[in-house]
Image (tube, helix red, strand yellow):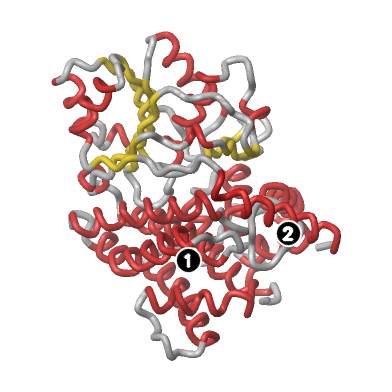
Amino acid sequence: MHKLKKLYCRTFQAALRLSLPFLPYRNPKIVGSVNALPEILEKHGCEHVLIITDSGIRSLGLTKRLELALVKNGVEFSIYDKTVANPTTANVDEALALYTADSCQAIIGFGGGSSMDCAKAVGVKAANPRKSLAKMKGILKVHKKLPLLIAIPTTAGTGSETTLAAVITDAETRHKYAINDFPLIPRYAVLDPKVTMSLPPFITATTGMDALTHAVEAYIGQSTTHGTRKNALLAVKLIFENLGTAFHDGKNPDARRNMLRASYYAGCAFTKSYVGYVHAVAHSLGGEYNVPHGLANAVLLPFVLEAYGGSIHKKLHRLAVEAGLADINTPPDEAAETFINTIKAMNRQFGIGDTIPEIQETDIPKLAYYADKEANPLYPVPVLMDAEELEKFYRMVTPDTGKDVEQP
């Protein structure tokens, strides 16, 4: 990266870090069961709610308990269940039309990060009907208060139930972008382990690795606080202790509950401290090829950590200690290597692997351009890289070229 661009990025990040104590961050109120929602909706004077989910979640019957609770308590509801893996502007338009037609007063995002992001974007459009989503991408461009927003994660990984971001894909250009503003933070996060027990093992794994990526990128970045470091460490500990159990024994309520907590804490960490190049590259892959976000993060994470080199070894040592992979006396370089190799082993164990077959060589410059635009100057990464430098990560995880790319 050019020296002037580096200076601009670090100056921008320093200013944002200094402003952290003065910004209106808040954590959603935790609710332990979907059965508690009718009382919350009544408290807020909401008589008709829009549930935003996807067809897979609904076909599994995961919304049934919520639907029964709402019916039993006389709360009317509508359901939009066409959200796709990387929600598009078309999804948002369709759901907003239903919200408006049925005079809804609240929005529930029920599902993974895609459903929650779609729900947030619908809230954004409901509050700003005359502005396009594209005009609100970036930072602090929403301004207005959203309708009551409740998040019910069915996957323990995205952290979207805690964040101020919604990631949306333009239905025509396939460009994926984020909308970031404080009104997007849900008012309530429902951490109900029962809604995650039907999650297939592979999705359990990829979403769990997504949460791990959130925690790691938040911790190794340069805009951490005491609170975000504490949340990230707790998330890493919970993931290493529970993800394997949740993968092999999906009906284990303790493992499911602890993974939901891990996702929540990781979300609280990266909401303030941001993520890094793993996410930037993964988002471009999701936008272009519809690669599931957790899968892309899992594959990319060890490669990006290796590329940062010694700049993060002390921090990875701390994470390795928290994960039970090293002790305080282990040399940082050794602990960092163990931590990264364990992530690679987890990817193999869970059947995730180390490649993304969808990548086309001719697309790489465009994808790297998008990743660069997303990450710089916002993400306070340990080592700055421009689009040309980011291209290597796509090649590392391309099946035909990955083994030939020089490792950092």
SS category of the residue bearing label 2: helix
**Is residue 235 placed above or below 314 in the rendered structure?**
above
In the image, farthest residue toward the left: 72
Name the residue beneath numbered marker 2: 10
For residue 113, which quarter of the picture? top left
Would you call the spot at circle 1 few (<14 residues within 10 Å), some (14-19), or many (20 or more)? some
Q: Is residue 296 above or below residue 92?
A: below
Q: How many marks?
A: 2
Residue 157 position within the rendered picture, expressed as x and y whole percent measured from the top left = 40, 52
The residue nearer to you, when weighing 206 against 44, is 44
Say whether disc 1 or disc 2 marks the residue closer to the N-terminus: 2
In percent of width and height, residue 69 lies at 17, 26
Q: Nearer the viewer, residue 394 or 260?
A: 260
Q: Which mark is residue 403?
A: none
Instruction: Give the left or right position of residue 360, taking residue 355 as reference.
Output: right
| Quadrant in which the N terminus appears | bottom right
For the point 47% across and 40% down, which residue is it? 85
In front: label 1 or label 2: 2
Question: Dot 1 lies on which element?
Answer: loop
Relative placement, left or right, of 154 versus 13 is left
Of the residues shown, which amino acid type is indicated by label 2? Answer: Arg
Residue at 53% in and 26% down: 124
- Residue 408 shows up from this direction: yes
Say the numbered circle drawn on residue 353.
1
Residue in the image at 20% along x and 33% along y = 36
Residue 27 horizontal/vertical position (percent): 40, 44
